[in-house]
């Protein structure tokens, strides 16, 4: 049984357009009949450009976007068939980190305060020593110095902010980690640093990894399998080596040429 299954998933975006004295509703297909499976302990990358539908897919996985058709199953629970309250019990096991420009860190809180928010939400019954051990473990894993805990996001550099976001996600001890545009806007050195970190924590914490990116090179480095999204459709799927070295679709070939 896969940890994550997406079957025949369709997402629509509705827009209101003014037509003289009335408003008409129009629909745009964001994802069209997408199917893929991710086994526990494995890694999968979904690659696509801005309008490929990848962001809407991540929001749907986190139950932040309404599904028009199809189903999503996580940890043997069909999340598209349950309410938000029931899904909240699963949310701890499914964590996501985004690009630095996504605003995933609260600017008014220090790193330590952000960690405490997570601990108070999910580990309320534990004592301070247990909290300390949890924070210490993720900070060491993400190579964060102790002094970072007193700082605000604006006082950190781009890589440190991503390391903090990753550490906060790991505090929940998730089964599935989604990395959505995690290296966007970083230079080559910073990107390599973060990719090495993701590989390290995946092995240390036994994570299942879903990478969502517009960079085929990032997908190739982090994932065993790659799916290519284009205009809302999954146009190619295979092992990372097959997709990168023997692409079948013209769009994939263009992505390969851009990543060389």
Image: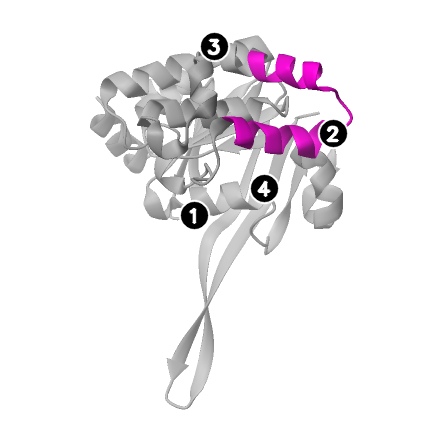
Q: Nearer the viewer, mark 4 or mark 2?
A: 2
Q: Earlier in the sequence, mark 4 or mark 2?
A: 4
Q: Secondary structure at mark 1?
A: loop
Boundaries of the magenta span: 112-136
- Say whether residue 59 is left or right of residue 86: left
Pointer 3 residue: 200
Q: How is the image coloured?
A: one colour
Whether residue 181 can be seen here: no
Pointer 1 residue: 232
Q: Earlier in the sequence, mark 2 or mark 3?
A: 2
- Say whether residue 83 is left or right of residue 220: right
Q: Nearer the viewer, mark 4 or mark 1?
A: 4
Q: Could you tell me residue 230's position as x and y percent?
A: 37, 43
Q: Earlier in the sequence, mark 3 or mark 1?
A: 3
Pointer 4 residue: 62
Residue closer to the observer: 155 or 245? 155
Q: Is residue 7 above or below residue 147?
A: below
Query: Which corner quadrant of the image does residue 73 belong to?
Result: top right
Query: For the point 57% across and 49% down, which residue is it?
Result: 64
């Amino acid at each position: 049984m896969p940890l994550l299954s997406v079957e025949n998933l369709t997402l629509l975006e509705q827009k209101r357009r003014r037509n003289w004295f009335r408003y008409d509703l129009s629909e745009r297909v964001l994802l069209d009949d997408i199917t893929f499976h991710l086994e526990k302990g494995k890694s999968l990358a979904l690659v696509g450009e801005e309008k490929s539908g990848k962001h809407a897919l991540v929001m749907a996985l986190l139950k932040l976007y309404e599904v028009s058709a199809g189903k999503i199953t996580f940890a043997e629970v069909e999340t598209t068939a349950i309410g938000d309250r029931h899904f909240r019990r699963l949310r701890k096991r499914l964590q996501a980190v985004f690009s630095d420009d996504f605003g995933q860190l609260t600017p008014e809180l220090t790193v330590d305060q952000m960690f405490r928010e997570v601990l108070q939400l999910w580990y309320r019954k534990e004592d301070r020593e247990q909290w300390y051990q949890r924070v210490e473990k993720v900070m060491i894993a993400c190579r964060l110095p102790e002094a970072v805990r007193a700082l605000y996001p604006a006082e950190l550099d781009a890589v440190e902010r991503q390391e903090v976001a990753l550490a906060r996600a790991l505090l929940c001890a998730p089964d599935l980690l989604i990395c959505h545009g995690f290296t966007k806007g970083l230079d080559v050195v910073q990107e390599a640093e973060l990719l090495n970190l993701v590989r390290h924590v995946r092995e240390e914490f036994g994570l299942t990894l879903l990478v969502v990116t517009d960079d085929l090179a990032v997908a190739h480095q982090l994932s065993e399998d790659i799916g290519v999204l284009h205009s809302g459709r999954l146009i190619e799927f295979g092992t990372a080596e097959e997709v990168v070295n023997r692409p079948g679709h013209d769009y994939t070939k263009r992505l390969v040429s851009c990543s060389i």
